[in-house]
Image (tube, rainbow, N blue to C red):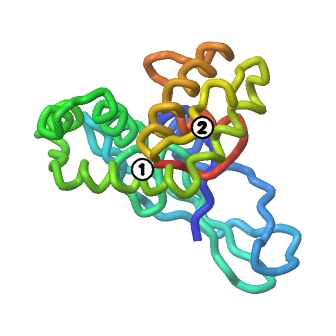
Amino acid sequence: MSIVLPLAHNVQGYLRRYGQVGPDLPLLCVHCDAQSLHRHGRYWRVVVCRWRLVRIPVYRWKCPECGRKVSVLPDFLKPYARFVSLLREKAIWRRLDGWTWERIAMAVSSPAVSVVSVRTLLRWFKRAVSWAAGRGAEPVGWIAQAAPALDIAGLKPADVTAVDLLTFLRQTGHLLQHQVGRLDRSHPGLYAFLNSLFGGPPYL
């Protein structure tokens, strides 16, 4: 089982903070009544950024009562995904802007590291649309909570497709980033940004 938490701004920040020693987290077991989990080592994982591959430690905890183990991932990653979430998110946003799949593949690929195929891009976009259709309304509530001055109900169309909802979330999310002063070139992306505010799971 994996838990995704906002542990660092990006891969480099994560390595600076936790490259040698894991975070001190008061984790509780979700499977039994144990009050706290114990540290249980780490494993190494290769993360794909656009320009390089990075090897990062992923720290584990174990329940002293039921023996279940949990890994804690930084929220620039999804469980079982190799590519950082920002790279995946940029590909999706460019498709919403009307880019061709071939152009997107060139924009997010680096021959020295990893070439992203059109088939992979299609899979990323399909998953994003599927998520928006099933759970896309959740961040709308988060944005309304973080920025009550935004008239979310007035901005969001009454009848929207999943793709429309992705576009809406992108636009309102960027507006929210501007309002709280957290938008810059090194920002890990809209969904990581929302995670950092509310501690929610990763999206896209």
| Residue assigned mark 2 | 158
Q: Which residue is mark 1?
A: 128
- Residue 136, given in percent of the width and then of the height, sits at 56, 48
Q: Residue at x 54, y 22 (%)?
A: 174
Residue most toward the front? 159
The secondary structure type at the circle numbered 2 is loop
User: Is 46 left, or right, of 185 in this rendering?
Assistant: left
- Of badges 2 and 1, the one in the foreground is 2
**Residue 81 is drawn in which quadrant?**
bottom left
> The residue under label 1 is which amino acid type?
Ala
Who comes first in sequence, dot 2 or dot 1? 1
Q: Residues within 10 Å of mark 1 (few under 14, many from 20)?
A: many
The structure residue drawn at horizontal position 80% and vertical position 66%, both measured from the top left corner, is 28
Viewport quadrant of the N terminus: bottom right
Q: Is residue 27 left or right of residue 172?
A: right
Residue placed at 74% from the left, 23% from the top?
147
- Res. 101 mark: none
Identify which residue, 146 or 181, lies in the foreground.
146
Give the structural element (helix, strand or loop) at label 1: helix
Mark 2 and mark 1: Cα distance apart in space: 20 Å
198 shown above or below 65 = above
- Marks 1 and 2: in contact by CB < 8 Å? no
Front residue of 5/95: it is 95
Rendering coords of residue 11 (x, y %): 45, 38
**In the image: residue 109, left or right of residue 172:** left
The residue lying furthest to the bottom in this view is 66
**Left or right side of 78 for 101:** left
Whole-percent x, y for residue 182 in the image: 60, 18
Callout 2 amino acid = Ala
